[in-house]
Amino acid sequence: MQRLVWHVLVLFAGLPALLPAQGFGIYEQGTCAMGRAGTGVAAPCADGSAIFFNPAGLAGLKGGRATLGVTLLDVQGGFTDDLSQQKTKLDDPLLAIPQVYVAYGVTSKLGVGLGLFAPYGLQTRWPLTFDGRFAGYDNILRSVYIQPTVAYQVTPWLSLGGGLDIVLGKVELNQRLDLAAAPVPTALVPVPPGSPPVLFGQFGIAPGTDFANAHLEATKTTVAGHFGAIARVTDRLSFGARYLMQAKFEYSGTATFTQVPTGLIIPADIAVGALTIPAGTPVDAFLNAPPLSLFDPTSGVFRTQAVTTTIRNPAQLALGVAYKIANGWTVLGDYQRTWWNSFNELDIIFPQDASGLLDRKLFERYDNTNGFRVGAEWARDAKWTFRGGYLRHQGAAPDETVTPLLPEGARNEVTAGFTLKLSRGLTADVAYQYIRQNDRRGRTREALFNQVPNTLLNHGVYDFHAHLFGVSLGYAF
Amino acid sequence: MTQRRVVFAAGLGCALLVAACQNDVLNSPRVPAYQGGTMFQRYVAMGNSITAGFQSGGINDSTQRQSYAVLIGGVMGGNRFYYPSLNSFGCPPPFTNIFTGARVGGAGITGTTCLFRSPNIPPYLSNVAVPGAETIDIMNNGPTPGTHSNPLTQLFLGGRTQVQVMMAAQPTFVSAWIGNNDLLGAAQAGDTTLATDTALFRAEYAKMLDSINATGAGAVLIAVGLGHLANNVVLPFFSSGTTWFGAISSGAFAPAPISVAANCAPPRGDTVLVSFAYGFGLVATASGGTPVTLDCTAPPVIEPAETRFFATLQLKYNAIIQGEATARGFAYTDSVNVMMDSLAAVLPAGSQFRPFPNVGAACSTFPFGAAFSCDGIHPSTATQQLIARKIVRAINAKYGSAIPNIP
């Protein structure tokens, strides 16, 4: 039973939402911290979430804490095309992201804990009518961090902590292939050396003609580290810092393809190189018969085959300050730096495809980002504590890389929450967060032939906002 | 004190929330700014070779850009007007000399040369016209019996019909000029039975208009033909038997062994029409050393009764089109004046319309006259401009719009 529960938790922790933080980062890893805009590097919440917000926060813990929480994400957004002025809405369902933290103060100075959280991940789901389906219509990036953590109070004012992250990664990409953008094999229509191949679009196939569905799925487990420090300068003032290392995934998986009927018929005899396609030939039959035989299960370009890629979850550094004012008030401020430039190029390699036609190079070229968070907490009495906060951060995606896979941008967010002590050892946390992303110009397609994209490809505007609801139960033992 | 802090915090939160909502308006749809411009944000042209930009027996990117549809799309100023740009030298490349068969691109280029479309595939098509299309082809593709698909049908439409491609572009305004080939093909063959009968024409034309109506777009419908046969004006592609009689009798094609029958001489020769394709085909055969005779009773020659048939049919087609335009509230216009006298605006004066080609002349010297390209059927660049201007005037008159003039 315990094993089953563990599997369920891992599964759900891997169901990320669409980017509640910069890039594909997710910062809502605890309801208490969520209520104060994620601040807490200098003074983590006492619910065990210090395992994520600052491992050093476990030092000095009295007794044990176990917290089980969930964040519900209601994501809204879409893409409005410049020409048609039609908006396609994201098709993301209501998502639930649990967090689990168990922490225990072994001595007055030594604390240990185990956390399960997902600081990176995304899911973008678009309807199949969306032009972005050719970039990806159901894209999932999961990174579940399981972090055993230890912290020690080195001096009365300084605590240090660290954890080893065992990171379970999974990437899944579902996309349609557009016949208009597909190259005609050079064996059929030769081209001069160095020239790009002729496209089926040059034979009149209209853009947006689905002819295949691609499903790419790969997994990888890797390790990383997480370190933190808290300096309590006075009883009221403390500073904190934490650093989460980059996690590199060398994914290896499988690509499967299925033919999607175009329903098109060649209306007249037409010569394609040395081949004359007779009038009345169904395009689907032409694609799946010699000399192309694209979907032949043993020799076709689109046979089931291996696929590899490398993705790096970037390193992140957070610095914070917390100050207890008086009358139960505490104000907090955090700064976060995330090294998104590690998400630069995404090479999707099909090692068994000798033609090389399937290989893709996606130029992401993310920028490092800065985020600023301010929060406040008011412990009204022993039973009620109220929180609020605001945060703003930059977008990681440069202007030329705002795509259906990850149409993110700079955001402003406001939060509120409270803790209610239900009984001596049991507390409940509730938080709400509103995310408003600045509208951003973007594109729906990748550049042809693995070319470097530019902003001239942008042809519409992505909008995004979300409502997040967090609930958790904590138990002190 | 505490209350003031709460109020301050709440106020700050609201201010930040408002600031967060100040997103720029990043979409910028191109709505034409002139009077009535909203209707012309996305213009789609349907039709046949003239609309597609066919000239001098061929079509390439250069001739496509000279189509009246492209000219109108340019002054309408809405979303970009996309046409299915062909790779140089074309498909097939236009003639540089119709008498020698030389085409753009030089040696090795023939009437079957086709270099496909440009690799810059547009997101949608605004000019969906296909050379050779008849009314039935607007909603039907080959190999359905009765249709007239050709390789350009595939290259331009990719297995879809003109109506499907038109609807995919989500037009706000459509022009339709279809029906010329419904009688021209029959006239070229000198066979009235090949012409589309009016019942079929009416039905297919109405289906096309139903589709335009379904988009909610406005439209202009253009009358069949350049000038009206009933006014005794014909394309320079057709010449009288008398003209051919004179040319052959005078040895214009010597030393080719071609002769002409007496039935091509006046007065009968004045009443029959010989197509350039038929007459020059005989010349070409003779040039190969085979003796031939032009007989003005041969089936390809258009007899007076057949001319009357085609003239009447043209009037019937146009009555149908005009009636539909009136019933549906669309604009209607002729392409040029019914007497083709508006072509006098084509410069240089006096060279607009040559009744018989200047045999052997290169296309650059306009053997069929400056108003026509080097095949005697399709309008020249100058005439395409006249057509565009006339259509714009008709649209503005019907819809009260102020589409700028064609330069």
Image: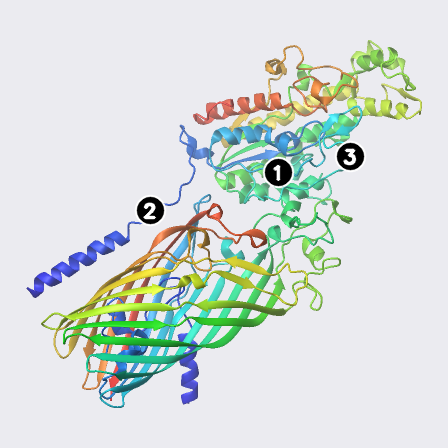
* Residue displayed at 69% across by 64% down: A300
In the depicted structure, whether residue B336 falls above or below residue A474: above
**Dot 2 lies on which element?**
loop
Q: Please tell me which residue lies in front, B397 or A16.
A: A16
- The residue pinned by badge 2 equals B24
In the image, residue B189 lies at what x, y percent? 79, 28
Q: Please tell me which residue lies in front, B266 or B200.
A: B266
Q: Amino acid at mark 3?
A: Thr
In the image, residue A283 lies at what x, y percent? 68, 53
**Badge 3 or badge 1: first in the primary sequence:** 1
**Badge 2 or badge 3: first in the primary sequence:** 2
* Residue displayed at 42% across by 52% down: A79
The answer to whether residue B246 is left or right of residue A83 is right
Q: CA distance from mark 3 to mark 1?
A: 20 Å
Asked whether residue A145 appears in the rendered view, the answer is yes
- Both marks 3 and 1 on one chain: yes
* Residue displayed at 46% across by 68% down: A312
- The residue pinned by badge 1 equals B85
In the image, residue B48 lies at what x, y percent? 65, 33
Q: CA distance from mark 1 to mark 2?
A: 35 Å
**Dot 3 lies on which element?**
loop
The answer to whether residue B19 is left or right of residue A146 is left
Q: Amino acid at mark 1?
A: Ser
- Both marks 2 and 3 on one chain: yes
Which numbered tag is attached to residue B110? 3
Q: Quadrant of residue B223?
A: top right
- Mark 3 crowd level (few <14, some 14–19, many ≥20, 10 Å Cα): some
Q: Please tell me which residue lies in front, A460 or B321.
A: A460
In the image, residue A392 lies at what x, y percent? 29, 59
